[in-house]
Image (cartoon, coloured by chain):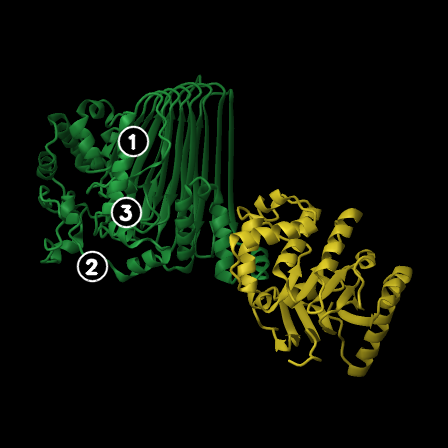
Amino acid sequence: MTETTPLLQIEDLHVSVDGKPILRGVSLAVNRGEVHALMGPNGSGKSTLANTLLGHPRYVVTQGRILFKGQDVTRLSPDKRAKLGMFLAFQYPVAIPGVTLGNFLRTAIKAARGEVMSAMEFRKQLRSKMELLRMDPSFAGRYTNEGFSGGEKKRAEMLQMALLQPELAIMDETDSGLDIDALRVVAEAVNAMLNPNMAVLIITHYQRILNYIKPDVVHVLVNGRVVQSGGAELVHRLEAEGYTPFLEEDRTSESERELVKGVSTDGR
Amino acid sequence: MAVSKLDVLPTEYKYGFRDEENYVFKSRKGLSREVVEQISRMKGEPEWMLRFRLRALELFYRKPLPTWGADLSEIDFDNIYYYVKPSEARARDWDEVPESIKKTFDRLGIPEAERKFLAGVSAQYESEVVYHNIRADLEKKGVIFLDMDSGLAQYPDLVKEYFGTVIPPGDNKFAALNSAVWSGGSFIYVPPGVQVEIPLQAYFRINTENMGQFERTLIIADEGARVHYIEGCTAPIYSTDSLHSAVVELVAKRGAHIRYTTIQNWSNNVYNLVTKRAVAYENALVEWVDGNLGSKVTMKYPGVYLMGEGARAEILSVAFAGKGQHQDAGGKVIHAAPNTSSTITSKSISKDGGRTSYRGLLKVYPGCENVKAFVRCDALLLDELSRSDTYPSIEIDEEKVDIGHEATVSKIGEEQLFYLMSRGLDEGEAKTMIVNGFFEPFTKELPMEYALELNRLIALQMEGAVG
């Protein structure tokens, strides 16, 4: 891998769920040290992309590929992707009853980083990251995501991200369900984690979180396609105009493509 | 224990146990009045015990095989040794222990001396010392902790007073069988007010018969006494036996507290048909913590009779059934006094076509007001081939009671797997983590070293590396 190889490269990605096409040709590249924002209206395929990037078995890649650090990971199982340095902060993390967050974190560190951390070192790191996220230490003794409030779940996701230290962190609507104070804490924690060796892909419906974490590149996803990419100024345009103009653009481009190909792409 | 492999080995005596005074004896195959008489004579038992055995034998012959539970039709009662003098049972060499069992010991990280003990080839001298130290301390307080045979020899009156009173020989066919041919097991008596702080473990009770096929255990906690007994261990018990049928009787007098912990991990050719029951008098507490991982078929429903006001019962039963296994387990509570309370928690996992059943009884007699009882059964199926059933029986003859029952059956969800795998755990590790979490309410009740071993054992079960 050379200096110019993007950390993440998505090439013409088509993804179906239960036979229904959701992503219809997504291409984008993320370099180390960059923060990307992927924005789009509900149902545009944002979470599908997030789940596909980590290899959820229900999301079937029908065309295109995903390269991570130059390696084709399209067919790799989720654990292999995690070991390579990919991480997904879930929008709706599931509960793992009977497994304490502390135990889960320690197992995950060992699994993802291949690192056996001493109990003392683990406690030290855990404590410092929990402080960063303003979490009560007793949290580590609770069963993972069981009975957590929405905000607690999101913080627990950020705690995992902080401890696993991925090279690519995909944050799937981490801002949803957070009040303004919690959002600020989470955003500060993410900013503290940022380093030139890693990249973050923030998936969001709203620009709110992007007031705290400044994106270098913004992509707008509509109907399973990236309809526009640009700098942070795109966020402001979205703020002012909403998604409607992009929906118009998408319809135009779609009809143009249909004309060119002479086939219907209406598989929605 | 009857070791069918031994009778084809001409060298069986070569590895004989060092114990000079013990002579080797093995009864004829099959069951008869002569065999029972012989057992009793060999042990030099009092006359009443012989009569007890013979009466039980009659009951065994008369009682039909239970057909309401697991399939027992393949048991061949004529092809079993009902008594083997333990010195011969130990007449084995480490080399004879199957490679798979050794490998499991390796992976469990069990020390060499302990392995040999568990495999039945060594007497584990170090533990004997430990055991004697523990015993000296307990003896000062008047605690009796012996194998059942020694208990009968040294405390015949105490034994006679309680033996067979909680589980009479006629209770069921296998209780009758055990009563006729029993050998080994533990006898514990804790005097009034004495708190035994450390768990008493069969592990440390070095006597040659503690791994008997038909062991008999009797624990009496006198008024205000407290004791925790742990039987079994998480390492697989090497046995070529086809039938294990124990009887365990607990008596918790006023204000006493008995906890009885079992982790059963018989090899997968064993029928494990065990009757366990306790009586709890006024304000007494009895806890059964019962884990079943091994065996081909297990039928076991630890029970508590709540006989005095304020008595409580806690039954925690877990079962793991892999390929070819049927774990038919549960708990029974009989409320025979007002203001009594009970909880039954059952957790079962089925994998690779294994089958688990919860079978339970909750009974409240008329006039037993203010009874509180709760039954919870959770089953987890790891694949489509496996099966889980619930047979809860609830008989309530009193209106002023508070009874709850909850049952769930779940499968390991795709979302849970994806979540854990996205954190770097492979599919096997992810499933094991979910399974360990499911068993956590049980594991957390175990002493640390047992909990760790249990987790390792579950991991091995998950890989299909055991059995």
One can see residue B218 in this view: no
B325 shown above or below A65? above
Secondary element under disc 1, as helix, strand or loop, is helix
> Which numbered mark, 1 or 3, is in the foreground of this view?
1
Query: Where in the figure is residue B309, as x and y percent of width and height?
Result: 43, 18
Categorize mark 3 by other alpha carbons within 10 Å: few (<14), some (14-19), many (20+). many
Q: Position of residue B458 (x, y in %)?
A: 42, 52
Badges 2 and 3, same chain: yes
Cα distance, mark 1 to mark 2? 37 Å
Q: Chain of mark 3?
A: B
Given contact means CB atoms under 8 Å apart, are the residues at marks 1 and 2 in contact? no
Q: Nearer the viewer, residue B245 or B280?
A: B280
Are marks 1 and 2 in one subunit?
yes
Q: Colour of chain B?
A: green
Which chain is indicated by disc 2?
B
Q: Left of B244 or right of it: where is B316?
A: right
Q: Nearer the viewer, residue B297 or B223?
A: B223
The subunit carrying tag 1 is B
- Of residues B434 and B112, the one nearer the viewer is B112
The quadrant of the rendering that contains the C terminus of chain B is: bottom left
Residue B137's tag is 1
In this rendering, do the residues under marks 1 and 3 share a single chain? Answer: yes
Q: Chain A appears in which tint?
A: yellow
The mark nearer the N terminus, 2 or 3, is 2
Q: Amino acid at mark 3?
A: Tyr
Per the image, label 2 sits on a secondary structure element best described as: helix
Q: Which mark is residue B96?
A: 2
Q: Amino acid at mark 2?
A: Glu
Q: Could one spot residue B162 in this view of the protein?
A: yes
Taking A12 as reference, is A57 left or right? left
Query: How much space separates mark 2 and mark 3, taking CA atoms?
Result: 22 Å
